[in-house]
Amino acid sequence: MISPAFRRRALIMTRHCGVQSLFHLRSRGPAVLFYHGVEERLIDPAVQCRHMPLWNFERQVDFLRRNRKVISMDYLFECLAFRGHLDPRQVVLTFDDGYRNNLEVVAPLLSGWDLPFTVFVSTRHITEQRRLRSYYIRAAVLYTKQRSVRIGSMSRTFRLTNREDRLAAECVIATAAKRAPEAIADRIMRDCLNLLSIEQWTELDALFSSDEPMSWADVKRVRSLGGTIGSHCHDHCILHARQRDEEVQYQIVQSKLLVEENIGECKYMSYPSGTMPDVSPAAYAAVKDAGYRMAFTGIEGETTADADRHLAPRIRAAPDYEEFRYLLSRSAKLSEGYAGACTAVRTGRQHEDALASERKGSVLNIHG
């Protein structure tokens, strides 16, 4: 197995000897990059895993300013809709969830460099000032003082005797919540909330202020600094086939209405999580019916003229600078599975495969 240190040295070598430049010659269209939050200092990366250190973000953006052309979401759409020129040097910067550091850290930095960007917000978290479910799961499991916990909604008990136990348990619980219907995912979150006292939550929320959501006033300020605002569902709901069709419709329409009511026109959205199993045929149809110009997934690839505008690809901005440079140069390679992934989403094939896998016992049994 290749060690991380060896891989990093190999990536640096491919960059210095020009191999990555050769890779990029195969590219046929812009890359839409996605981030979440950016923080000056991370206290516990396991809890703050959605946030990139500021110094690393600045280094990535500096590279993009010097070697790529950062374009707006509207410009990308116009190129796709009216067959404009799609330049492989172009990139679009997007940020999911709606963290307050998008206003306090990201927006001033990008505005100062005159770089356009888009923020996709989960509207319930903005309206109610409620953090994302995944934060509560991570913080509860990693910081409860209990050494064994019962998650009743999963009918599971987890041993938490050391850090490794806690990280493993958090992964299992977070995966179960992600794969569950929305109502059951909320029960899992409530079970985790009950692992800590109100005083403990107050202390942890102050310690991990990185996960605090913006308010609507904050979102307006982001827009005034050059940000385009889009939807990321109402509850950050994962729109897989286990969700009721009524829930999917509500998540997609309600978030659009709230952005339009508080900010203005809402033309774009990104699917929470957004990998192939996380977007059902019903979600795909509802997004199109709701009138979004484009909807972005977590399916990797570059944006070419034949991309499905309601299953648009994105590339995760890797936290390691060398991985970031490498993946950006390999966007054409990442695109090789894009068309097949879109077909699987539209037909529902990936959900049939996932459910078959669960029936074989590879996924947790979650009780309603």
Image (tube, rainbow, N blue to C red):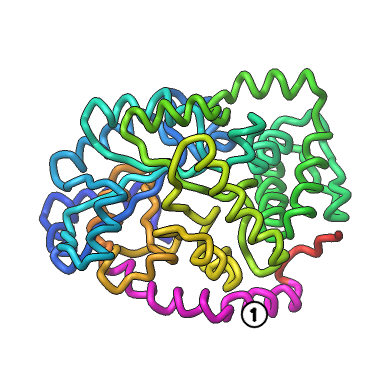
Q: Position of residue 77 (x, y in %)?
A: 30, 58
Q: Looking at this view, is 5 or 102 the one in front?
A: 102
Assess disc 1: are there few (<14), some (14-19) or many (≥20) residues with their C-alpha within 10 Å of its C-alpha.
Answer: some
Q: Position of residue 311 (x, y in %)?
A: 43, 66
Q: Is residue 271 visible?
A: yes
Q: Looking at this view, is 241 or 149 the one in front?
A: 241
Q: Position of residue 31 (x, y in %)?
A: 28, 56
Q: Position of residue 32 (x, y in %)?
A: 32, 54
**Residue 207 is one of the magenta-drawn residues:** no
Q: Which residue is mark 1?
A: 352
Q: Amino acid at mark 1?
A: Glu
Taking the image as shown, residue 137 lies to the left or right of residue 84, namely right
Q: Which residues are magenta?
A: 333-361
| Residue found 50% across the figure and 37% down from its top | 98
Taking the image as shown, residue 213 lies to the left or right of residue 86, namely right
| Residue found 28% across the figure and 65% down from its top | 81
Q: Main secondary structure of the magenta part?
A: helix
Q: Looking at this view, is 304 or 83 the one in front?
A: 83
As drawn, 182 above or below 301: above
